Amino acid sequence: MIRISTLAKNSLALLGLIILSSTLSAQGSRPVTPGNFSSDPGIYDPVSFGDDITFNGCGSSFENFSLCEINDLSDFALAWRVAPEGQDPLAQGTTVALFGLDIDVTSVNGFTANTTFGTDVADGLNFTINSGASSVFFPTPGNYTLQLSLLARGRRFIQLPDDSFVNTFFSGTLVRRAETIISFDRNAPITVPEPLGFLVILPAMYFIVRRQRKLALKQI
């Protein structure tokens, strides 16, 4: 049996990487700029408690393109997390949805049986969830912190909408997080103040009394 030394294995791997890099460089590949990767969870008007809300991550960008413009997001992953304002959105039980993770998702911080899991990151960039008494993540009115975590995998080649390529030759992953506040307002029931309610029924009482007087005169 022929044994290949660790040095030889590393040399072969490096050679393959150089060949692949040279090939894609000829196609216009360039190193990714880490500063050109950002997370944007969106800005939301107040939501009526009980209504659905759609999280919108299309403001997030990679190499100055919206993630919603990139056709192949297989080298990315995302997580939506929610916590009452003032609490840690990375705490246990906060993860609303995970998309694009090819690992055991139960190891992700905040993952629960109520977490939605998907393989296509594009499906997670616009994600709808309910609010109301039956909601796991928005069960009461008030303010909530919404966090969008994005992950880009290292040592990949990513095609951009302009058909150019960028290479992520950093080791590990690149993570970006951003937060925003969502307010859920309960629509207060409209009630008639007691004095106003009395004024509403006063004309009816007048006509009832007048009718009774007429009937009494006829009987006399």
Image (cartoon, rainbow, N blue to C red):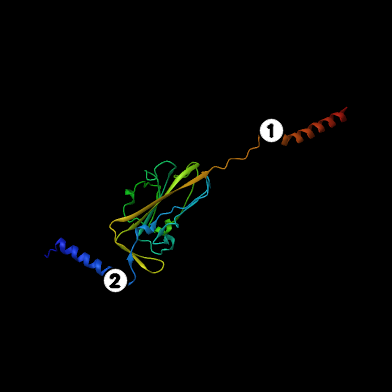
Query: Which residue in the rendered view is the most extreme toward the bottom?
Result: 26
Position of residue 206 measured from the top left corner of the image (x, y, whole percent)? 78, 33
**Foreground pick, 155 / 103:** 155
Residue type beneath disc 1 = Pro
Describe the element under mark 1 as helix, strand or loop: helix
**Foreground pick, 112 / 72:** 72
Residue sitting at x 81%, y 31%: 212
Query: Which residue in the rendered view is the most extreme toward the top?
Result: 220
Tell me the CA gap for discs 1 and 2: 83 Å
**Foreground pick, 76 / 213:** 76
Query: Which residue in the rendered view is the most extreme toward the left?
Result: 1
Tag of residue 195: 1
Residue sitting at x 19%, y 62%: 10
Residue 193 appears in view: yes
Tag of residue 60: none
Q: Is residue 206 left or right of 193 when viewed as pictured?
A: right
Q: Which residue is mark 2?
A: 23
Q: Is residue 115 left or right of 168 when viewed as pictured?
A: right
Residue 99 appears in view: no
**Vertical arrangement, residue 171 with respect to residue 219, above or below:** below
**Vertical arrangement, residue 135 with respect to residue 217, above or below:** below
Residue type beneath disc 2 = Thr
Position of residue 58 measured from the top left corner of the image (x, y, whole percent)? 45, 58
